[in-house]
Image (tube, grey):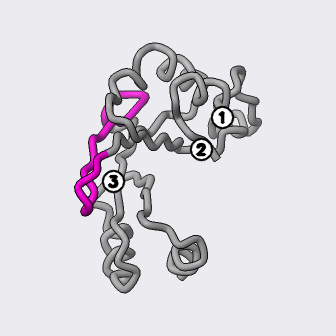
Amino acid sequence: MKVEKVVKICRAEFVVDISELGEKDPLMQNATRSFESLKVPWYTTTALDRQGSDYFLKRVKTPHGAAFDLIALNTGSLQAKYLTNGLVEKARLKWRIVVGFHPMEACNTTIEQNETKQVPVSLYTIFQKHGVASG
C-alpha cells in the first residue's frame, strides 16, 4: 500500500523497480496487478551479479512515444568509474534515469564486514558533468 500512497502523493508518472529477478519477479508482478488503478508504467531492472556486470542499461519507450535510458549501477566503489568511463555516453538518449542498488552513503557493505564507507567521489558532481539530474 505504501507504493500506492507515494505514487498518489507525489503524482508519479512512472515507477522504477530495482528487482533481483527483473520482470519475472513474482512480487513485482503482483504489485503491478495490485496497483493497476494507479495507471502508471513500471520499469524494471535486473540484479547485476546475475549478469556478471556492474551496470544495467535499458532503452525504454514510454506509452506517450518518448524514450529514455534506464541505468542501474552496482553501487560499490566502481560506480564512479562506470559513469566516467563511457557508460553515460552509451546512454545516448536525452533522458537518462540512473538508479543504484544501495543508498549512496552505504556503499561497499559486505556481510562479513558490516561497516559502510563513503563514496570517494561525489556522485552529484559526476551526475552534473554527464547531464544526469539527481535528487
Q: Position of residue 120 (x, y in %)?
A: 72, 21
Q: Which mark is residue 107?
A: 1
Tell me the amino acid under the disc marked 3: Leu
Between disc 2 and disc 3, whose residue precedes? 3
The residue pinned by badge 2 equals: 102
Rendered image quadrant of residue 14: bottom left
Give me the C-alpha separation between circle 2 and circle 3: 16 Å
Amino acid found under the numbered disc labelled 1: Cys
Which quadrant would residue 56 be assigned to in this image?
A: top left
User: Given the image, on which type of amino acid does mark 2 rest?
Assistant: His
Q: Is residue 116 above or below residue 65?
A: above
Report helix, strand or loop for mark 3.
loop
Q: Badge 2, how many Cα within 10 Å: few under 14, some, many 20+?
A: some
Give the residue number, with chain letter if any, for mark 3. 21
Q: Magenta part of the protein: which range?
A: 51-67
Horizontal and vertical percent for residue 6?
Answer: 58, 73
